[in-house]
Amino acid sequence: MTAPIQTDVLNLRGSFPGAGSEAEPLAARSFDRMVADVRVGTRSRIGVTVHLTMAEAEIAWRAFEAEAVGLGFQNFDWLKAWFSQVGEAEGVEPAIVIVSLDGVPVMLAPFGIERRYGQRCLVWLGGRFADYKAPMLARDFETQVTPDQFAVMWDKIRRHLPAHDFIALENQPPHIGLSINPFASLNGETAPDDGYVFPLPASYEEFTQTFRPATRRADRAKERKLEALGRLEFKIAETPDEARLMVADILDRKATQLRAQGIHSIFEDAGYRAAYVALAALPPKRKMLQVAMLTLDGEFLSGSIAHFRQGHATLMVHTYEPTHARMSPGRLHLLKLINASIEEGHKIYDLSVGYAAYKDSFCDEPMPLSNYVVAAKPWGLAAASAERAKLGLKRRVKSSDTLMGWLRGWRLRSSGA
């Protein structure tokens, strides 16, 4: 079901008017009159369409994402795989918003409604399958809509959304490509986790020069030691069948690695595993995943699952076999992934969300993310407050080495690992 297009007349050259009640009905305005308004820049007409199913949004979504600035986590194929295998079973109701100015789409926001604390909560689609959550934007969105104007636009969008009691928009990056994320301009709070992103130079040789000479020597020495033990091979899946088999193996190993740390992960969940396999099975023209393994005489050393979009490669899953941990097969694997990305012409490499010690050697500064959690109705205040408190506690724990050490110990004791 698709909600009817709602329109308001908004002044995009200055402050938005306080209300859209002065606007003539769309049917009463001639095409020539609308074009004239656009040309003089006096007023622009905003249209809001809300799609309540993935199927109804698909055609418009695919058409927009082909030209828009966006992250792979908001591609239709990515979120369709998650929704089919996870979201629908969890009772998430899509509310996919497409915003247009003068009939031209400028933003796609893949929202959903889910239940939290017994209330209806507005969220970004994707759950734990989307490390970053954000809209897709027209390339000229920033030149058309200022942050102040977006705040008014956001208020209008909310009025057209299905009923919800509070809002929890989490893990929002400050930028989408080179564009500012307009949702980051809302009055949010710092998320518990950071992202780890860095630019890629034109050549791998230039990239390696960012490391100290001693680090470069150590990397070469460890690779030579592994090569002395047998045939060392780095392989990226070339076909969907090959990718599916490698994905299943990598997810098994990652789940085992995390379980040994007392962590129950999405890699043990049948729905999330099925979503990864569905993405691996996409035809070549819609390929999103880069699945890779490092092997020694055919035996697994390290594996990874990444995705790429618009020159931005994002590593989501990375695991290694501890048998040869002293020779850093995980780091060697990552260096080979980065080399492959540089050869493909990628401009950005993203180690995704969450701290790990190895990320510090690649990223100068972590990228802060934001959460926007507010009540939408008076009866949503308690739920919004509880959600903010939960996220605040999580942020406090993750920023403290002492508390994180206690948490790791508790997980191990609780799991019996």
Image (spheres, grey):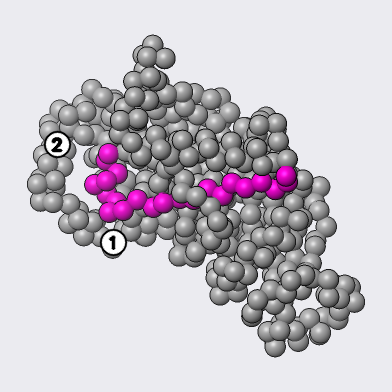
- Compared with 134, 114 (above or below) is above
**In this orientation, does residue 372 appear?**
yes
The residue that mark 1 highlights is 201
Q: Nearer the viewer, residue 332 or 17?
A: 17
Residue lying farthest top?
A: 416
Name which quarter of the figure residue 230 lies in: top left
Type of amino acid under label 1: Pro
Q: Secondary structure at mark 2?
A: helix
Picture quarter with the C terminus: top left
- Compared with 287, 175 (above or below) is below
Question: Residue at image x 72%, y 80%?
Answer: 43
How crowded pointer 1 is (Cα within 10 Å; few <14, some 14-19, many 20+) is rated as: some
- Residue 241 screen position, x and y as percent: 49, 34
Relative side of 22 to 98, left or right: right
Name which quarter of the figure residue 305 lies in: top left
State yes or no: residue 371 in magenta: yes
Q: Nearer the viewer, residue 100 or 9?
A: 9
Question: Residue at image x 90%, y 77%?
Answer: 28
Relative side of 348 to 141, left or right: left
Question: Residue at image x 58%, y 56%?
Answer: 135
State yes or no: residue 118 in magenta: no
Type of amino acid under label 2: Lys
Residue range (magenta)? 357-378
**In this orientation, does residue 113 appear?**
no
How crowded pointer 2 is (Cα within 10 Å; few <14, some 14-19, many 20+) is rated as: some
- Compared with 144, 108 (above or below) is above
How far apart in space, not on screen, are marks 2 and 1 (Cα)?
24 Å
- Residue 306 screen position, x and y as percent: 42, 43
Question: Residue at image x 45%, y 32%?
Answer: 247
The residue that mark 2 highlights is 222
